[in-house]
Image: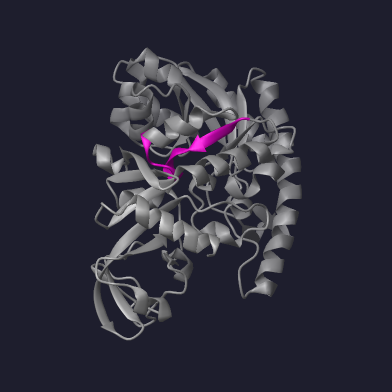
Amino acid sequence: MTARAADRARYDRATASLDAPLALVDLDAFDANADDLVRRAGGKPVRVASKSVRCRALLERVLARDGFRGVMSFTLTESLWLARSGFDDVLLAYPSADRAGFAELAADPKLASAVTVMVDDPAQLDLIDAARDGGREVVRVCLELDTSLKLLGGRLRVGARRSPLHSPGQAADLARTVARRPGFALVGIMAYEGHIAGVGDAVAGRPLRSRAVRLMQAAARRELAERRAAVVRAVRSVVPGLEFVNGGGTGSVQHTAAEDAVTEIAAGSGLYVPRLFDNYTSFTGRPAALFALPVVRRPGVGVVTVLGGGYPASGAAGRDRLPMPYLPQGLRYDPQEGPGEVQTPLLGSPADDLLIGDKVWFRHAKAGELCERFDELHLVEGEAVTATVPTYRGEGRTFL
């Protein structure tokens, strides 16, 4: 029996009394992936990206492990909710225009000490001040640096369009603006190199593209390491007491951790290891989060139909954004239908061994987005479900 076949048998036994659709997290794989992130971080703490987990119980589990410290959140409402729930170090990774949230933050000492918000423009400081509604707490802020690689005098750009702060001078100017402004404290710098950490460099069947990605990423790492160090020096000349410099992502942990200027690493997807991370040479993880759909029809030889399945991931539309039929191995989508809103036909010889009510196991393309489809996660250890915990959705929290 192959390892994947053994996993299927184990998951089927663990969930035999549960009806699909359902989602599970294999805790043995989850913990092994956590250990791998810590190893690759080389002694620097890993800040957990909550959007890649979206389950409080699992955030608490990983933060209880050595090598992890703090949460990287994705909305201000989520940040405040986590802080009220006992998470005392929450870095909001994206700028916000949530005026009600800023009013709460500025009025509550506990929230103000636990949450750090992201800025890259003085106008964001204006919005926060206008939203204070009498709140006088100092708001902790972090500057986000644009990590994109600019070539040909800026005519060619590789990387996400995020912050307008690209140079040391731009970052230092905003740092001075924050430092001079009452009611704010600049405590950190963040730089997420998505074109390095979030792009696979070993895509099956595309050797030339994969080589081009590896060459691009090597050049981008060199350029960013030099520029990030210069930015940190420039900002520290304004704010010597800077608390942290955050960088990285699951696909670049060890490379970012090697930079002296970086004090902590951000990662989250590497805990679940969704299908997009099958295309990396920098690490190999164990799939930990899966969902099961039930067989509801057998239309003919080599075909079964499962309930649901149309769960595409965010990003530029393409086949790589679709969930992957995973167990039993060998099933594939009908190219004329793909995964459907209510039902999904699957083709392949393994279909002939499936009966009505059997489970087909899938991996989502991205990590935490799976949790937007399910209210709870069944936590599996060995051959048993040892706990069932709510996702954000299961707690009535859909932040975006």
Residue occupying image coordinates x 31% and y 77%? 304
- Foreground residue, 164 or 315? 315
Residue occupying image coordinates x 61% and y 30%? 45
Residue occupying image coordinates x 62% and y 22%? 242
Q: Is residue 28 above or below residue 113?
A: below
Q: How many marks?
A: 0
Q: Quadrant of residue 2?
A: bottom right
Magenta span: 45-56
Left or right: 393, with 149 as reference point = left
Q: Residue 170: give x, y in percent of width and height.
A: 63, 37
- Foreground residue, 232 or 123? 232
Q: Is residue 296 above or below residue 106?
A: below
Instruction: Tell me the quarter of the image containing the C terminus.
Output: top left
Q: Residue 372: give x, y in percent of width and height.
A: 32, 50
- Foreground residue, 326 or 104? 326
Residue occupying image coordinates x 55% and y 25%? 177
Q: Is residue 238 above or below residue 171?
A: above
Q: Residue lying furthest bottom in this view?
A: 301
* Residue 314 makes an appearance in the image: no
Residue 46 forms part of the magenta stretch: yes
Left or right: 265, with 152 as reference point = left
Colour treatment of the image: one colour
Q: Residue lying furthest front in this view?
A: 1
Left or right: 238, with 92 as reference point = right
Q: Residue 97: give x, y in percent of width and height.
A: 36, 37
Q: Residue 154: give x, y in percent of width and height.
A: 67, 57
Q: Is residue 64 above or below residue 310?
A: above
Residue 108 forms part of the magenta stretch: no
* Residue 108 makes an appearance in the image: yes
